[in-house]
Image: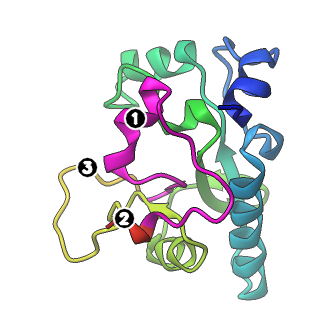
Amino acid sequence: MTTFYEDVLKKHKLFNSPKRVDSLDLLEPTFRAKVQAILDDAASHNIKLLVFETYRSSARQQQLFDEGASKLKLVGVHHYGLAADIVYSRGGEPSWKGDFNFLGQLARAHQLIWGGNWGYPQTPHSFVDADHVQWCTVGRQAALFRGEWYPVAGYDPYQEL
């Protein structure tokens, strides 16, 4: 199975970098288009957003875990080009202040899972990541991490919930 992860990410110079990456180019192309659509939709409502982080290496994930900024020690969906953290842009600077429920609405409209409810809005969650969107259900993550599954164009995670 040929995937963006295998063909692009694993060969990219930032694959093992501990640096934060915010480039949309390191997102799987279908997912990238969905993230761009969220940014465009928000802008049409005069909401300024920016993508804070896209691809995340194992080294970066470990660093975030060590700093207490992440509960995940091992790589997550970001590592596969299938997740992005989207925050407010205040004077061109990232801001996490404000309500992110609109991001959940935009994510759902573009068939993405929002970290504020992980696709289950009626269920209380012990882990909320309100600035996070991903193109993969939580239930699919284990298969993704094992290399047994990767989304293709037309994939709608809400068909699995």
Decide whether residue 155 is among the magenta residues. yes
The residue singled out by tag 2 in the image is 160
Residue at (68% x, 20% y) in the render: 19
Alpha carbon of mark 1 to alpha carbon of mark 3: how far?
A: 21 Å
Q: Position of residue 90 (x, y in %)?
A: 70, 62
At label 1, the amino acid type is Ala
Corner quadrant of residue 23: top right
Which of marks 3 and 1 precedes in the sequence? 3
Out of 143 and 54, give the one closest to the viewer.
143
Q: Name the quadrant of the N terminus.
A: top right
Q: State which region is magenta.
A: 130-157
Element at badge 3? loop
The residue singled out by tag 3 in the image is 127
Are dots 1 and 3 in contact, CB under 8 Å? no
Mark yes or no: residue 99 visible.
Answer: no
Q: Name the quadrant of the C terminus.
A: bottom left
Most extreme residue toward the front, as rendered? 1
Decide whether residue 131 is among the magenta residues. yes
Q: Position of residue 46 (x, y in %)?
A: 74, 84
